[in-house]
Image (cartoon, coloured by chain):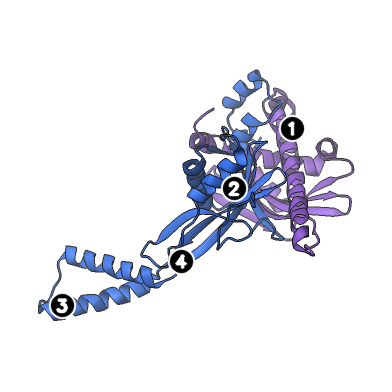
Amino acid sequence: MLDVSVSYNRYKFLGFEFLTWLWFLIDNDQETIKKTVPGEASLAIGNRIVLVNTRKDAVETVLIKGEEADLQEGIVAMRKGAVVAEVNLSYRNGDQEWRFTLKGESLGVSDLVPPATAPPESPEDAEGVFLEKVYLYESVLALIDKIFQHFIKERVSPDWNRTMVPRIRKWISS
Amino acid sequence: MGLLSSRVSITRYKVEGELQAPVVESVANILKENAIVDIDEGDTEKRVGWTSFDNPFRPVFENSSFVVGPYLIFSLRIDKKTIPPKIIKKQYETEMANRLAESGRNYLARDEKKLIKEEVTRILAIRIPATPHVYDLIWNYEASLVWFFSTLASANTELEELFFHSFNLPLIRLFPYTMADLLPGLSDKERDVLATLSPTDFME
């Protein structure tokens, strides 16, 4: 494997492309999303998207936030060459909802709000509450891994340039 | 944001290598050896060490207290004394004025000024208590995975250094390339393609 700091910088575009692809799928290809989430679960864009455009000398950042925000501004930014650098997602499974932000560069998970758990009623309960929290974190991290795995398989296949890139381009330009 | 908070941030790591068996005993000994020591009484400005998840200001690693199910849970604590620059400036200028008055001179050499500043900072560091910053972590030993509950770059760097120093096991941060390389499912041929990828142009 390459040196960690070299590979972090050299391949951070993979994270930006992953989030751009994910937004495209959420908007246009729920069938593929269904293959990666369990059962009747769903994945949607949350309340924040950050796009960056590094094509010019200075980095341009576009921030879209708010529950009912118009995401069209993000599409316009992508037409000018921007990619998704950060996205807030809502993952629902049954009556439970996880909210979290994924940063493309690092794939770090921030602002993760899992479904609420009952507070421990006694010191003996603490272990159970802890294990429940870990299970809830595990659920969302496993989901990210599964989606990323799907992306990376597609990214290294000839279908990426042949099929997926033209679809994403069409979505951006429409 | 601790791991039981209503809102958390997580950075994931793969742990390379294994500890000497019995693992829990090895971890307990290593945590004790590298536990945080208070710096409130001295002039040390910063210290980093391990502490207990459930008692971060009185670290105890006895009786497998840090083991829950298959997980090892403990915390990284960074104690730092932050002396406001304006207080240093005030004390420094007061001390310089005293020295000038005592010596009868009207200037101080550069080395003298430097020594005064160091001394002022040292004395202030003794008087100012350290601010503790606690970051929880979960180590799934069997899966060789660590979840660190912060995405703060400085805290992650401290974790990587202390973890390696303590356990002699490198942590590989999981970011796009390392995740792609470590996730199961890619063939050797696909891994070769991964290494040669360049950014996609989504503009027509």
Distance of label 4 from label 3 (alpha carbons): 32 Å
Q: Residue under label 2, please give it.
A: A52
Secondary structure of residue under mark 2: strand
Distance of label 1 from label 3 (alpha carbons): 72 Å
Q: Residue under label 1, please give it.
A: A150
In the rendered structure, the answer to whether residue B134 lies left or right of residue A150 reads: left
Secondary structure of residue under mark 4: loop
Q: Residue under label 3, please give it.
A: B100
Subunit that carries the residue with mark 4: B
Residue type at the position of mark 2: Val
Q: Residue under label 4, please give it.
A: B130
Task: Give residue A160's quadrant in the image.
Answer: top right
Cβ atoms at labels 1 and 2 below 8 Å apart: no
Cβ atoms at labels 3 and 2 below 8 Å apart: no
Residue A162 is situated, as x and y percent measured from the top left of the image, at 72, 25
Q: Which chain is purple?
A: A
Cβ atoms at labels 4 and 3 below 8 Å apart: no
